[in-house]
Amino acid sequence: MTVILALLKPLAALNTLFLRLGRTFAWVAMGLMVLIIILQVFFRYIVGSALAWPDEGARFLMLWMTALIAPSAYRWGGFVSIEMVKDLLPARIGAFLGLCLLAVSLTVLVYGFQLGLNHVKSGWLFNSSSLKLPLEFLGLGLVRIKLAWMYMSLPVGLLLMCLVNVELCLKACAHIIDPEADLPDDRDRMIVAVE
């Protein structure tokens, strides 16, 4: 148990830091996305001339927002899960079942991470159709953004979810040894009551 706690405490602290930063950037991305969409509505229906870049810009922000908020939802148990069988079992057996499911999830996450990296590699070949950086002050003119920056949201999100999964696996191992173990908790966790 000492080894598990020695691994779990720094990993939980690291995850708390990364996920806190991720949630902050996700909220900023959400706000920017809303502003961009409102700007597009204004130009399309009030001015009468739609802009070319807001749709792709909002999509870019949506992908990053999702990648940065999903690991927090995973850590907090915000994904759909059926725990009826686990709850009917004795605590240690339920923790073992949970560990087995987490191991399967980790396999899928690692495979998805590898696929995401391959997708990013191909994204350096293609430019965004409408997103450009105005770099005239550097003498570069308008520079098109590579699609890889958009695609990078997938491996980043999956890597963060892998870190969370390892933390959850360590917690499950600790609960197999001692179902009443006092483990590090995420103080940032949002509790949502559904009635």
Image: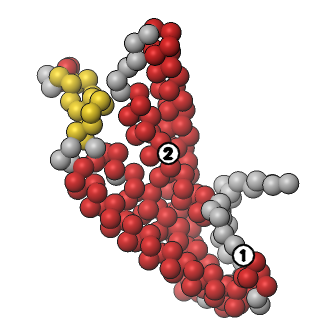
Please state which of residues 108 and 47 is positioned toward the viewer in this rendering.
Answer: 47
Task: Identify whether 10 is placed above or below 104.
Answer: above
Q: Are marks 2 and 1 in contact (CB under 8 Å)?
A: no
> Disc 2 to disc 1, how far (Cα)?
28 Å
2 or 1: mark nearer the eye: 1
Q: Nearer the viewer, residue 137 or 5?
A: 137
* Residue placed most toward the observer, 174 or 73: 73
Left or right relative to 168: residue 153: left
User: Is residue 129 positioned above or below 107 on the image?
Assistant: above
Q: Under tag 2, what secondary structure?
A: helix
Location of residue 137 by image quarter: top left
Amino acid type at mark 1: Glu
Q: Residue 130 falls in which quadrant of the image?
A: top left
Q: Is residue 45 left or right of residue 117?
A: right
Quadrant showing the C terminus = bottom right
Residue named by callout 1: 83
Q: Is residue 144 left or right of residue 167?
A: left
Mark 1 residue crowding within 10 angstroms, few (<14) / some (14–19) / many (20+): few
Q: Residues within 10 Å of mark 2 (few under 14, many from 20)?
A: many
Tell me: residue 186, above or below residue 51.
below
**Residue 90 position in % (x across, y down):** 77, 90
